[in-house]
Amino acid sequence: MGLDAVKRSKPGDARPGRSPGDARPGRAARVLHVTECWGSGVASAVHAYIRATPGHDHWLLMAHDAADPLLGEESLLRGLRVFADGHLARIRDVAAAYREIRPDIVHAHSSYAGFYVRSCPSIPRRRVVYTPHCYAFERTDVGLPVRYGFRLAETLLAPRTGVVAAVSPREAELATGLRAGQRVVYVPNTIPNTIPNTIPDTIPGATLGTVPGTASDAAPEVPAPRPRRERSALTAVSVGRVCAQKDPAFLAAAARAGGPGVRWVWVGDGDPALRRVLEEAGVTVTGWLPREEVLTLLGTADVYVHTASWEGAPVSVLEAVGAGLPVVARDIPALRSLGVPGLVDTPAACARAVQDLGEGARRESARRRLAEALAGHTPGHQAESLARAYALALEAV
């Protein structure tokens, strides 16, 4: 499905003769989000960015895998387009979308989208905002030559980047290392108290450079502890696509090492072979569930487990914090940069850490330490940072 598959703009959105760059800091902007990776993490991040800048017109050009659950994009956007297949076709799709929508900002999400957008000569460099959501050269499932190739591509494309909106201190550090003088803004992902499926089209008075007046600087309260039902086993939950990045084999090894005292659950689906690895280790794989069911399941769990071998700033960890769960997470650079406490480096250590949380006082202490470490991940802080990134992209050169 290509650019002819379009959710057309609402009446009055298209302004004939309008030139890209008409918007300025402090005024509403037209933002085109581009991503080829519409998984749960990127989808949640884009939703949060729209929520953080509700006075703007937001458009989306995406590639959609039928396995990825949609989250009601039509209600959030002025228009939705779907990529054609093939890299060259997608670069043409970006060029056509830019020509027809005439956005003030093109916000590329993930590495391939960054390649498509920055390979389009018609898009002015300064209007490009790039959020890698973890640089591809951080991947551990490919060999060093491939990783070097990804890094070289990012180095060559860096001069075509106006602003990097990094999702973690680690990502910000990598961005500054790719190009001297690169403009970088750290835009934290947020801890949700509740996870909405939709957001309002507009909030009166909220424009670029302003933040909706809802306690923007306040840290989220540490969720109240939930009484644990009496049962014979702990419930440890992971959420995400069953794929190499999330390293289900690490969780499977932890499940084998954990013994019968822990019930392990993976919410999501993906690679059939990796799913079998989980199931053969005794892990329950639920498949994709509606958002409400995921939240319900988190509400009945004792601990959240995150085993990814590379990440940007995992939204699922923040959602677990918002649900009042302690987290046992793998020691990777991104989580280290975020200050997540108690990271583990082996499946056996993961299993021990989960078992230790069977004791109520330890579970409560771990939950509070995690919430305090991530206290800066508020909607207000995100809105302020994203407004700063967009304002930089709109500055006259």
Image: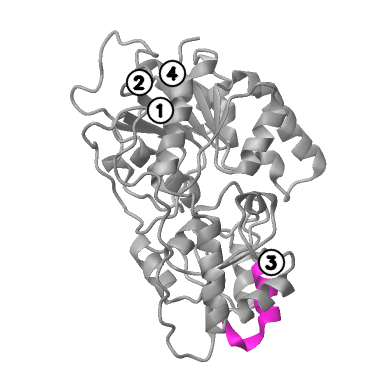
**How many angstroms separate mark 4 from mark 2 (CA)?**
17 Å
The local crowd at label 4, few if under 14, some if 14 to 19, many if 20 or more residues have their Cα within 10 Å, is many
Mark 3 = which residue? 250
Amino acid at dot 3:
Phe
**How many angstroms separate mark 2 from mark 3 (CA)?**
44 Å
- Say which element carries label 3: helix
- Say which element carries label 2: helix
Which circle, 4 or 3, is nearer the viewer?
4
Residue interval drawn in magenta: 249-263
Amino acid at dot 4:
Leu
The local crowd at label 2, few if under 14, some if 14 to 19, many if 20 or more residues have their Cα within 10 Å, is many
Instruction: Give x and y (percent) for residue 151.
Output: 73, 33
Answer with mark 2 or mark 1, whichever residue precedes in sequence: 1
Quick check: can you spot residue 240? Answer: no
By secondary structure, the bulk of the magenta-drawn segment is best described as: helix
Answer with mark 3 or mark 1, whichever residue precedes in sequence: 1
Q: Looking at the image, do the residues carrying marks 4 and 3 touch, with CB atoms under 8 Å apart?
A: no
Answer with mark 2 or mark 3, whichever residue precedes in sequence: 2
Residue at image coords 51%, 14%: 124
**How many angstroms separate mark 2 from mark 1 (CA)?**
8 Å
Q: Position of 346 compared to 373: left or right?
A: right
Amino acid at dot 2:
Ile
